[in-house]
Image: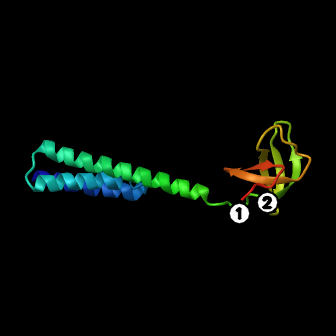
Amino acid sequence: MPGYAYWFILAAILVGVEMLTLSFYMLVVALGAAAGGMAALFGFDLRAQLGVAALIAVAGTVVVSRYRAQRTRVKNTVQNLDVGQLVTLEVKRPDGMMRVKYRGASWDARMASADLPTDSALYIQSIDGTTLVLGPTKPIA
């Protein structure tokens, strides 16, 4: 079997793995393997094939990594509609955590800073996972 066939078989296997992981990283490695196969098809030696495959895989990984980081930054800057909403304190526990009523349900909450008062109105400052982070003033939009 010619050398390029091994590269294309490897690329096909990596595409299959990508379909299981859905991360795009295996896809760019598969593209690198396909590029190595193309280099083999055009008669380059094994060292050149490996270099082309590695170059494409590394460059693709960097591109995917930057794209995902950019997308995460954009997603985090979109205003959460819950921020700035008023909540009602139900229970304050000794460890500083609270249960508050918001949108008809009880939520775990904590103050944005331990020295902030909890006896006045409480507003959602941010959300940390499923915990509401509260403060005594409504945040500026």
Q: Which residue is mark 2?
A: 85
x, y percent for residue 4:
14, 54
Tell me if 87 is positioned left or right of 40 in this view.
right
- Examine the rendering and report whether any part of residue 10 can be seen: no
Structural crowding at the residue carrying mark 1, measured as other residues with C-alpha within 10 Å and reported as few (<14), some (14–19) or many (≥20): few
Q: Which residue is mark 1?
A: 81
Q: Quadrant for residue 85, please give it.
A: bottom right
Of residue 20 and residue 88, the one placed in the foreground of this image is: 88
Of residue 118 and residue 38, the one placed in the foreground of this image is: 118
Mark 2 residue element:
loop
Of residue 116 and residue 110, the one placed in the foreground of this image is: 116
- Give me the residue at 73% from left, 60% from top: 82
x, y percent for residue 24:
39, 56
Tell me if 100 is positioned left or right of 26 in this view.
right
- Give me the residue at 19% from left, 44% from top: 50
Please identify the quadrant where the C terminus is shown.
bottom right
Q: Quadrant for residue 30, please give it.
A: bottom left
Callouts 2 and 1 close, C-beta under 8 Å: yes
- Give me the residue at 84% from left, 49% from top: 136
Mark 2 → mark 1, Cα distance in angstroms? 8 Å
Mark 1 residue element:
loop
- Give me the residue at 33% from left, 58% from top: 16
Q: How is the image coloured?
A: rainbow
Tell me which amino acid carries mark 1: Leu
x, y percent for residue 126:
71, 52
Q: Is residue 79 above or below residue 50?
A: below
Tell me which amino acid carries mark 2: Gln
- Examine the rendering and report whether any part of residue 62 can be seen: yes
Structural crowding at the residue carrying mark 2, measured as other residues with C-alpha within 10 Å and reported as few (<14), some (14–19) or many (≥20): some
